Image (cartoon, coloured by chain):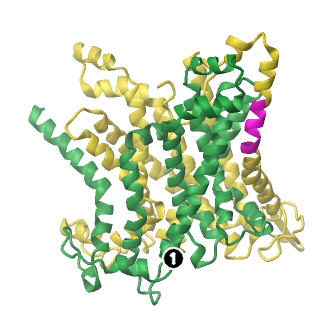
Chain colours: A yellow, B green
Amino acid sequence: MANVQAGVPPTDKALDVERKGARPRSDLSRQRLRSAWLFLAPMLLVLALVAGWPLLKTIWFSLTNASLSDLEGAEFVGLRNYWEYVDYGDGEGEYFGLLFDPQWWNAVYNTVYYSVISVAIETVLGLVFALVLNAEFKGRGFVRAAVLIPWAIPTIVSAKMWAWMMNDQFGILNDMLMAIGIISAPVAWTASPDTAMWAVIIVDVWKTTPFMALLILAGLQMVPGDVYEAAKIDGIHPVKVFWKVTLPLIRPAILVAVIFRALDALRVFDLIYVLTPNNTQTKSMSVFAQENLFQFDKFAYGSAASTLLFLVIAFITLFYIKIARLDLGGRGK
Amino acid sequence: MPYAVKRTGFYALVVFIVLFSVFPFYYAILTSLKSGTALFRVNYLPVDFSLANYEGVLTNGVFPTNILNSVIVAVVVVAISLFLAVTAAYALSRINFAGRGLLLLTILAVSMFPQIAVLAGLFEMVRWAGVYNTLFSLIFAYMIFTLPFTVWVLTTFMRDLPIEIEEAAIVDGASPFTIVMRVFLPLMWPALVTTGLLAFIAAWNEFLFALTFISNNSTRTVPVAIALLSGASEQEIPWGTIMAASVIVTVPLIVLVLIFQRKIISGLTAGGVKG
């Protein structure tokens, strides 16, 4: 149970066969070392081919004038896809490129807005779910199983299911909300500019809260029971115990879960593409990039958008790895 | 607060959680069993029972082929990534070598790659290799998310096994490959089943690559097929058929997930797989 937290890098404990048994026999060590690289080679080769090389090619395409029909004829154009000043003469000029494209900034805004709001709601709701699942009650196993269902459903299927539930004419959501009097007229959830983003957020919250809850639950289960017992004996109010004892203890688990979800939310594609197609209110960075790459025949421009999104996520990943490492160091060996 | 009130409040919360989780899928099943104009009446309880939508989706068009495509891709992806991951995880967890930590961090970093960042480069590669519009393109591309994940989880699992199990084999002069196959594999079935299942689900659900690398209806996988299901005209979205197709591709996943519930929860929390 040492490493229940998501994605904490494995530590170096307990496994150094060399150190224990085979140190004097150096051919054995050498043989094991050789096989280590032999064992790793196929996996590393596949990763280099499927991740490393395509990433470099994407970055390269972002510096060219490539078009979908002529990838081979791509010529280097420098940073023109990102930033270009066109001088019209006599002091007049205009900036072009991704960094001056309002549509790109709209996609950035949508993505950040969606990520912040949905991850925030999922964290709070996930914490509530986790606290409930951590309590002992009849039928807990059943509830735990039920919670896994949204997670198991493919994103496309959940998008379609909710699109139907949110249908303006025949949807059950309007029916319910009108029955209890929250709305007086049917709402076109996925089409109306005011609600489209909220429709996306609702579906995402439904689909990923269980995942959040399970990650936080893993953290909760590592809190030793005697902590609560001591608090109970001292007569401390349960609410205070939660804020002063439980929350600080599970903070690392929550932090890891939040970063994982945030990274996932920033690259959102499927849900938005299927639930609210061609809607400027919800278009995310990934959708913007995919459209430019394959629908608008602006391959280089789309590559530039992909590269920028990659840089944002890489930055957050480095930040995360740093945190995870600090966490490892803090726990000691 | 009186105990009874607290208790009622707690159970109300439990009921809310269950309804919140289960209702949308329940409603999809309900819709899939309606036909004709019944579709346009909102019901909360099952009143119709017609299998017409299921019959329609399974006999007309290429949906059965799409299911077969998804099964082929997911099974092959799981087999290849588990095979590559078992040996790699052995090296990463039980052999001490310089650069191991860096390698693990690289693998973790790859698992966080946004798919869109490699899309342009992969597209060029897929076309260059002549596998555009074939399932090979997906089998290859899906390694980017299944491989780092399986390596990571299996490494965590193998690292926690005691040294003793390996010592005897080393003393007997068994080669590392023999040790992996004879000593570790038999112990690893639980971990292999869990990671395999999670990788299967990830491959089964993937959309972006499947949308981009396949343009032929009968070569598509189910998520894209469902997303593109359309009626005779733009306005006529065949909701009944879409719901039937959705239920067909989801029920096996839900059954598997419920069977392996406990294992999945531990695998999820060890690997932080995306939903």
Q: Is residue A162 magenta?
A: no
**B196 to A231, vertically: above or below:** below
Residue nearer the viewer, B172 or B75:
B172
- Left or right of residue A82: residue B107: left
Indicate the position of residue A111 as horizontal and vertical percent values. Answer: 56, 58
Figure quadrant of the N terminus of chain B: top left
Residue nearer the viewer, A289 or B44:
B44
Residue nearer the viewer, B236 or A42:
A42
Q: Which residue is mark 1?
A: B228
The number of discs equals 1
Crowding around mark 1 (Cα neighbors within 10 Å: few <14, some 14 to 19, many 20+) is: few
Residue nearer the viewer, B158 or A106:
B158
Callout 1 amino acid: Leu
> Which chain is home to disc 1?
B
For image coordinates 63% across by 38% down, the residue present is B86
Residue A214 visible here: yes
Residue bounds of the magenta highlight:
A35-44
**B75 to B62, vertically: above or below:** above
**B229 to A233, vertically: above or below:** below
Residue A281 visible here: no
Indicate the position of residue A115 as horizontal and vertical percent values. Answer: 51, 52
- Is disc 1 placed on a helix, strand or loop? helix
For image coordinates 90% across by 73% down, the residue present is A90
